[in-house]
């Protein structure tokens, strides 16, 4: 609990209207999407980068913990103040698109800009910012960079890190770091912008982001491949991609998800569908789209697809995507709580990974519906348990640990997009050696010697 005199100092620095320590605000800022609760001692809203410098210098001098926060939509507890301190909330003032440089195809934004607001602004100019996490309507670009967020379009266009050209950030000491440039090529110095991307607020507070833009493709169509087995669908993923298909998205749903969509949401899906692959293809001329669809269709059929559907118009495209967009809410038919992890494996390992996931689920007696971004090898694995049953929760977590071990053995990783935060911190030892964890700690110590920036996250 920080002393009242510090709250007074923050009020002097920023004005009373930018510092909250009343109970209602502390509760409001105690959550993220994990629904775990930890209250900060105060919520502080910097007006600009200079405020961030002053706050961090003060906090360094007084050893006060600082938790940077965007929209609080994180799935792993990154923005939660586990040991109190101040929440540094970027959404109130530091939320402006500073520049859209059409000639260089670059956008410069403050960290509190909502992802979709940037997408909308650049699309009006015929430009495109592809990273589209499902939280795009409310998650901030500062949060996206800090978690290296991905989205449905990652199969073709990559993830947030592929668009970060430069960052401005403030170290725990209050010093400003300028990392990267507005140039396509930049090989001078360490890649500090790369280091800060996915650093989950543990190394510095990001105050400005320069993002690469591309031109917006003119045409888009959706497709759905229907398979009788998960194995066929998983084989079709890597075989179609390596045979030249380049879809925007390739999303997967297994037979448990298909069943749940039919039962809970009454969605009409083909009988006998054991797995679905859904996605978009895009291009600037219709022939590009036709070529992509033909390549996918042929490859899917060679790998056992029973059918291949293509959207004729936007209405049909929405209908095909409706199933995927409702995958998550539908699976509650299998248990009141889902222990949801976003594992990632090399794409050729998808068939074996899925087989092993179901076997682990069976061993513990849980249904494990899986869906997600198969085109990137990133699958949402949901161990479904009765949330009111302590024993089941404990067993569910054991199943998750086994899944993580198996994924790492297959050359995969603990998280494809949600990060480590608090929830996956206990599993870091599975994925990293002692020496690798020590390297992470050394990097953290170099940037934040007093450990005031988001401590206890990422297993550090
Ligand atoms: C329904 C739903 C769907 C989602 N879908 C996706 C998805 O498709 N793909 C995906 O990748 N994620 C997804 N997420 C997770 C989440 O939205 C992302 O991780 C997002 O990037 C978090 O952004 P945020 O602004 O909410 O950040 P927060 O949750 O506020 O913070 C996340 C982390 O970033 C740090 N941080 C925030 N701002 C800064 C800053 N300026 N400087 C330094 N550190 C900072 C925080 O300390 C914290 O560690 C989803 C979440 C929900 C609830």
Image (cartoon, grey):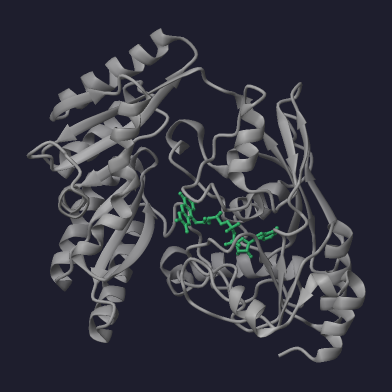
Residue visible at 43% across and 70% down?
427
Percent coordinates x, y for residue 299 in the rendering: 23, 23
Q: Quadrant of residue 119?
A: top right
Looking at the rendering, the quadrant in which ligand 1 lies is bottom right
Q: Nearer the viewer, residue 152 or 245?
A: 152
Percent coordinates x, y for residue 121 in the rendering: 66, 34
Residue visible at 22% across and 19% down?
298
135 on left or right of 115: left
Residue visible at 74% across and 62% down?
204
| Total count of labels | 0
Q: Quadrant of residue 297?
A: top left
Percent coordinates x, y for residue 39 in the rendering: 61, 82
The reply to whether residue 38 is visible in this rendering is: yes
Percent coordinates x, y for residue 181 in the rendering: 78, 37
Q: Quadrant of the C terminus?
A: bottom right
Q: Quadrant of residue 316?
A: top left
287 on left or right of 267: right
């Amino acid at each position: 609990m920080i002393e009242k005199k510090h709250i007074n100092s923050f009020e002097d620095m920023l004005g009373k209207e930018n510092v909250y320590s009343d109970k209602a605000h502390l509760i409001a800022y105690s959550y993220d999407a994990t629904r775990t609760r930890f209250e900060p001692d105060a919520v502080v809203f910097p007006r600009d980068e200079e405020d961030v410098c002053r706050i961090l210098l003060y906090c360094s001098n007084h050893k006060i913990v600082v938790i940077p926060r965007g929209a609080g939509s994180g799935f792993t507890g990154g923005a939660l103040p586990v040991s109190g301190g101040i929440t540094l909330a970027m959404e109130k003032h530091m939320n402006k698109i500073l520049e859209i440089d059409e000639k260089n195809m670059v956008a410069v934004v403050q960290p509190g800009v909502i992802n979709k607001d940037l997408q909308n602004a650049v699309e009006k100019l015929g430009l495109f910012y592809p990273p589209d996490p499902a939280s795009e309507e409310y998650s901030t670009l500062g949060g996206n960079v800090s978690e290296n967020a991905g989205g449905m379009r990652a199969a073709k266009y990559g993830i947030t890190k592929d668009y970060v050209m430069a960052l401005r950030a403030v170290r725990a000491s209050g010093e400003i770091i300028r990392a990267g440039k507005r140039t396509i090529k930049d090989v001078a110095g360490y890649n500090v912008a790369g280091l800060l991307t996915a650093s989950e607020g543990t190394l510095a507070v990001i105050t400005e982001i320069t993002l690469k833009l591309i031109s917006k493709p003119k045409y888009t169509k959706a497709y759905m491949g229907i398979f009788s087995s998960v194995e066929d669908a998983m084989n079709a993923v890597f075989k179609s991609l390596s045979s030249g298909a380049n879809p925007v998205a390739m999303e997967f749903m297994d037979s448990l998800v298909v069943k749940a969509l039919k039962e809970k949401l009454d969605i009409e899906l083909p009988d006998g569908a054991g797995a679905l692959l859904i996605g978009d293809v895009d291009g600037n001329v219709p022939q590009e789209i036709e070529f992509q669809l033909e390549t996918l269709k042929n490859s899917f059929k060679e790998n056992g697809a029973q059918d291949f559907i293509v959207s004729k118009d936007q209405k049909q495209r929405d209908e095909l995507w409706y199933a995927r967009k409702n995958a998550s809410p539908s699976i509650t038919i299998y248990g009141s709580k889902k222990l949801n992890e976003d594992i990632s494996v090399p794409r050729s390992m998808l068939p074996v990974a899925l087989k092993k996931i179901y076997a682990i689920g069976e061993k513990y007696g849980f249904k494990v519906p899986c869906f997600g971004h198969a085109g990137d090898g990133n699958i949402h694995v949901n161990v479904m348990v009765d949330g009111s049953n302590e024993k089941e929760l404990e067993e569910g977590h054991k199943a998750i640990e086994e899944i993580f071990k198996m994924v790492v053995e297959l050359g995969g990783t603990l998280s494809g997009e949600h990060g480590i935060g608090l929830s996956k911190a206990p599993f870091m030892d599975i994925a990293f050696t002692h020496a690798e964890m020590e390297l992470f700690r050394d990097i953290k110590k170099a940037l934040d010697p007093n450990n005031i920036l988001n401590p206890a996250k990422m297993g550090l």
